[in-house]
Image: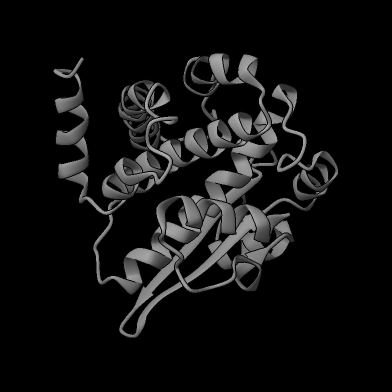
């Protein structure tokens, strides 16, 4: 399931990072704690561990084993359900971080933490929206923006700066995705999404602001 979701997301943007997520995956919380040199709160089911050195970056993605098991059982690629969106969103966030970091590294493109979170918010929405459209679940599609951007809660363990970053990313992504929803059927090749994916953080934010002036 993880490989299929990774391939699905990478295909949306025509931006395969060239690596298999499974080769960088950690499902053991104790190992993730040791590599990250801190204890992950029990409520955290996904995180990306990054270390930068002279030869580049070292990266691992932690996804909780129970979370992955639930997602395999749910099989959202064939049977997407609203009550399973929370699990799907967590896994899509991990996939998004991995693919975007890998793609940016391969393209010699710098990336900020805010940009990483902003892109992940967009990725979660558009991947889920396209799945809902393919499965003709138009009720979920109509309610998806509210479910992913309004009905949310942030981890209480976040620091003030972390929470502010997540809130800003959520706000900008919500504005962008609200405009996207009506354009999905008219853009089967995802040209707007692919253009957005390749922008720098300042250009992404400027682009979102410009959408406010469009009908």
In the foreground, 154 or 190: 190
173 vs 17, left or right, is left
Q: Residue at x 53, y 73 (%)?
A: 19
204 vs 32, left or right, is left
> Percent position (x, y) of residue 213?
14, 18
In the foreground, 124 or 15: 15
Quarter occupied by the N terminus: bottom right
Write down the quadrant of residue 27 in the picture.
bottom right
> Percent position (x, y) of residue 47?
56, 51
Q: Residue at x 61, y 36 (%)?
A: 131
Residue 174 position (above or below residue 6): above
Q: Residue at x 41, y 53 (%)?
A: 13
In the foreground, 86 or 158: 86
Residue 7 position (above or below residue 139): below
Residue 174 position (above or below residue 80): above
Total of numbered circles in the picture? 0
> Percent position (x, y) of residue 58?
46, 74
78 vs 203, left or right, is right
> Percent position (x, y) of residue 67?
75, 44
Write down the quadrant of residue 29 in the picture.
bottom right
């Amino acid at each position: 399931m993880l490989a299929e979701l990774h391939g699905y997301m990478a295909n949306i943007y025509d931006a395969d990072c060239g690596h298999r997520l499974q080769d960088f995956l950690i499902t053991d919380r104790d190992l993730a704690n040791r590599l990250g040199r801190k204890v992950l709160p029990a409520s955290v089911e996904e995180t990306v561990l990054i270390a930068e050195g002279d030869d580049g970056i070292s990266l691992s993605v932690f996804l909780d084993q129970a979370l992955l098991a639930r997602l395999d059982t749910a099989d959202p690629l064939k049977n997407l359900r609203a009550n399973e969106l929370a699990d799907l969103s967590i896994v899509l966030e991990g996939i998004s971080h991995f693919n975007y970091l890998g793609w940016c590294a391969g393209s010699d493109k710098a990336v900020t933490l805010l940009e990483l979170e902003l892109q992940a918010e967009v990725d979660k929405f558009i991947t889920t929206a396209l799945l809902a459209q393919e499965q003709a679940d138009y009720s979920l599609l109509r309610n998806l923006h509210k479910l992913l951007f309004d009905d949310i809660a942030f981890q209480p363990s976040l620091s003030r700066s972390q929470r502010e970053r997540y809130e800003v990313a959520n706000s900008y992504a919500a504005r962008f995705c609200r405009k996207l929803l009506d354009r999905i059927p008219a853009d089967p090749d995802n040209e707007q999404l692919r253009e957005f994916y390749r922008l720098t953080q300042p250009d992404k934010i400027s682009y979102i602001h410009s959408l406010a002036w469009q009908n």
